[in-house]
Image (spheres, grey):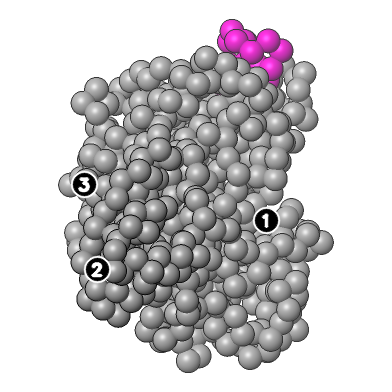
Amino acid sequence: MREDVYEVPEGTEYRYLVQDEEEEQIQYVRRLYVSPFLVVSRRCMFLISCGVIALLSLAGCLAYVAETPPPGVAEVETECGWLRGSWKGGAYSFKGIPYAIPPVGERRWRPPADLVEAGQCWQGVYDATRFRSICAQVQPLRKDGQVMGQEDCLHLSVWTPSLQPAKPLPVMVWIHGGYLHMLSSQERGYSPTEELAARTQTVYVSLNYRLNAFGFMALEVFREGSPTNSSGNYGFMDQIQALQWVQRNIHNFGGDAGRVTIFGQSSGGTSVWALMMSPLAKGLFHRAIDMSGSYVYNASLESAEKDNLEFLRRTGCKNAICLRGLHIAQVLQAIPWQQYPAWAADELTDLPVKGVFLGPVAVVDNYVLKAPPFETWEKGGAGAYNDVPFVVGTTEQETDFSTKVYMFFLTTSLLIVHSDKLTPFGEALTNQALRLYNSSAPCPTSDRCPERLFTTIVSDMRATCPRNDLAKRAAGALKSPVYRYLVTYTPSKQANASSWLPFPSRFAFHLLDSLAFFGGLEMMLGTLSPADISFQEMITKYFVHFAKEGKMPEEWPKFPSHVALLDKNISFVTSYSRERCDLWEENGFYSYAWIN
């Protein structure tokens, strides 16, 4: 046990450090000193022999012991007040920290409001030892889905291995997926942990942001009185507000505000891309990792507001006052989940139907997003977007999480069964697709070749090939390095279904890379094989190196010269599936890529 001596003026409030070398943890403790000199010690035994001032000092010691948080508790100061967090598994965690005023009542469908500016910080020490509510949502995405969460949900959490590192640590800000409709920043196996922070010596932040209609409903009635003269994209504004909080506060958690990496999966990846394009996020992050995000968000505000009149009709409201008075369930049930403009994304794991598209959720609102993304790169000038090192990743069988994959389990060629969907695009295209996706190829997974074939073709046209195009355009527009990876690893066993993986998955499925990074594979697979562990370690190694250095290690070439293939080991190819991707691009299939 080490004893530290500090001199403090009488009556001064001073926060001092107590380090327990046996437990290897640091605690920040608040104490109002009453004596001009005090020796700090957890047991305070030495104070008993302090001569004339022994009795006074002993009284101070007893008061100190009474106020000291129990083992495993720590306190940190932020711009809005003190937080009490916890220590576990080699790192500190501070959970459920408010970063904006709750967007309820009159604040529903408005930009997030800063707590400090509004004078609404908390009094005393805020309990950050537990998560707060997830954001309002339904699961599954149906009118009769189970209503979950609350609107008072704008919280973030921080995990850090040290509150006072010798050198500030890199920061990784996680943005969760879920179609922009569901899930949260605190999903087990799909969010940071103390163990991850300790093992990687990195500070992690995860955040909740408004979802579905609460986060992305664009309607003209919301423009009235709006300081932005826009509507929609409130969830993106929440993410920007959280990144501003990180810039102002993360140094108190041992983080480096000049080395912030944003990374997200699925619609979290879409969010990463949107933040790269938003002038409002300028300077708030310094690297970006997009894992399986969507390719399309080019709907104008006017077209989205017109389409979303179906939502307004379903609510029975005529104005914003009425809409802001609706119960959470009434809002969620009024969303046109399956009727155009459909928000449920039911068809994104199947071959597209010609001319049938989902309704837009993220929109070009001329505030958060000034123009469609590629137009921003081409015409906006370097100051219009965030030029930071960028990683674009997908998995080989992105759509391997749907019952549609298994409906034709024993079919020799799934394309023949589905040719009625491809035929309207042209008979020649169907013949070319049958040639390029040949089901007679060797089957490495026993009797599951038909499933693998079907998931690969839909994944190529909906996700992988469009993301190749995104990476190519990024490499042409950005001065910063761009990297591209494709996960080709097949786990040792079938992944179990869960709330965010609705059907058992067998191949390089959507979520595989993020689950590996967060240690969620064991939860999904059970006991991990040596190959599973190697894959998990590889993902973590490269992501953390990128976050620390702003580039991949020397062995990973920049795009477009190479694409990294992530199996249990890493390898590189000059291109992935070029002939297949050319087929989908030349026939206009990128407009059917994943949206939201």
Q: Nearer the viewer, residue 408 or 169?
A: 169
Q: Residue 539's x, y, as percent? A: 42, 30
Mark on residue 344?
A: 1
Q: CA distance from mark 3 to mark 2?
A: 31 Å
Task: Look at the picture and state if 86 lies above or below 106.
Answer: above
The residue beneath circle 2 is 37
Q: Residue furthest top?
A: 442
User: Neighbour class for label 1 at 10 Å: few (<14), some, many (≥20)?
Assistant: many
Q: Over which residues does the magenta segment extend?
A: 437-450
In contact (CB < 8 Å): disc 3 and disc 2: no
Image point (77%, 18%), residue name: 410
Determine the residue located farthest toward the right in the rendered image: 144
Is 150 drawn above or below residue 571 in the view shown?
below
Dot 2 lies on which element?
Answer: strand
- Mark 2: amino acid: Phe
Residue 444 inside the magenta-drawn segment: yes
Front position in the image: 593 or 330 = 330
Tag 1 and tag 3, C-beta contact below 8 Å: no
| Dot 3 or dot 2, earlier in sequence | 2
Where residue 547 appears, x then y in whole percent? 30, 42
Foreground tag (2 vs 1): 2
> Dot 3 corresponds to which residue?
167
For the question of whether residue 89 can be seen, the reply is yes
Instruction: Using the image, determine if residue 136 lies above or below residue 429.
Output: below
